[in-house]
Amino acid sequence: MGDPIIQSKSPIMHEAALQALGIPGAYVPLHILPENLEDAVQAIRTLGFRGVNVTIPHKVAVMAYVDLLDESAVAVGAVNTIVNNNGVLTGYNTDGIGYVRSLKAEAISDLSGTKIMVIGAGGAARGIVAALLQEKPSSILIANRSVDKAQDLAAECQSKGNVVGISMNEVAEMLDGVDVLINTTSVGMYPHMDETPIDPELLRAGMVVSDLIYNPLRTRLLLEGLERGCKIHGGLGMFVYQGAYALEYWTGQPAPTETMRQTILHCLG
Ligand code: ATR
């Protein structure tokens, strides 16, 4: 459910996954205007849907219309997945945990004790920081253009780990010892592909450089990292694994993540 929804690659990815699992089912795009969201959520019960994904602009508003909220949704303050158990709707957020699962599968298998820097303090950063804290890193630095947003998010997370908000001017001095650098901003996204959220000269060999952007698949930040001996991790995995978690909640079966990835890659051309 989203507005707009025509651009979503989720239907094609989930249809391929259902087919690979041999589950007779369908995943369809539903164009839902904000004023119809409450009725649309009620319709999940009426029509007996097993579940839905919720996307922009409904992720926050939909929280008011489900029966239960999983702690993943509470931590992030947004829902992207609803599961219907005999008319009882539970809201989850699989974005952050999807990102972390992809980071661990593709770049760094153990995040415990690591020093992580997150660039950006918006909705995407919120979900990712909450999920990263479950992995027991030694510290998370959140750097943001508007420093007060970084500090607010850090303060909210303080009880769950060592999280500090910093300004973009402090990035250079604080990068020392950082194991994983994550861009959650839109800087570098198509069509502004020559931009980077930080000075690429700051990237050091051995560091994991991760970008949530998947268009392009390799942002300039990742390409600069690759040139300097960093291990790079692009945003496609987050998209695949947020969907994988949702599919697993709905079906109770392990998601065919490779099929899902290949389907998206094919569709991105
Ligand atoms: P999302 O849900 O994708 O995180 P968001 O909540 O609007 O979207 O947050 C966007 C994040 O990218 C913010 O951290 C924003 O910084 P500000 O809080 O200072 O606005 C950051 N961002 C977006 N465009 C940026 C740019 N050109 N340079 C630096 N940071 C940028």
Image (cartoon, grey):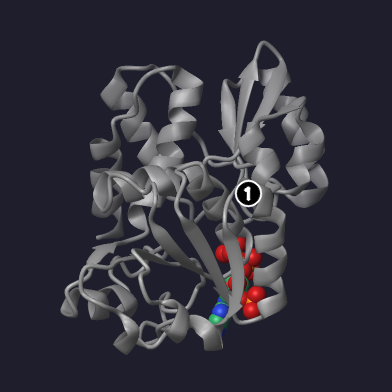
Closest to the observer, 177 or 54: 177
Q: Residue at x 45, y 51 (%)?
A: 137
Determine the quadrant in which ligand 1 lies: bottom right
Quarter of image, res 167: bottom right
Quadrant housing the N terminus = top right
Q: Residue at x 38, y 42 (%)?
A: 101
Left or right of 149? Residue 98 is: left
Quadrant housing the C terminus = bottom left
Left or right of 221? Residue 147 is: right
Q: Residue at x 37, y 19 (%)?
A: 253
Q: Position of residue 134 (x, y in %)?
A: 51, 41
Left or right of 164? Residue 261 is: left
Type of amino acid under label 1? Gly
Closest to the observer, 103 or 265: 103
Rendered view: 201 above or below 219: below
Closest to the observer, 132 or 253: 132
| Residue count near mark 1 (Cα–Cα under 10 Å), binned few <14, some 14–19, many ≥20 | many
Q: Secondary structure at mark 1?
A: loop
Mark 1 CB near ligand 1 (8 Å cut): no
Q: Badge 1 is on which residue?
A: 2
Numbered-mark total? 1
Q: Residue at x 74, y 41 (%)?
A: 62
Closest to the observer, 229 or 30: 229
Q: Position of residue 50 (x, y in %)?
A: 57, 20
Q: Position of residue 150 (x, y in %)?
A: 65, 70
Quarter of image, res 69: top right
Rendered view: 184 above or below 75: below
* Res 12 visible: no
* Res 191 visible: yes
Considering every residue shown, the one lying at the far top of the view is: 86
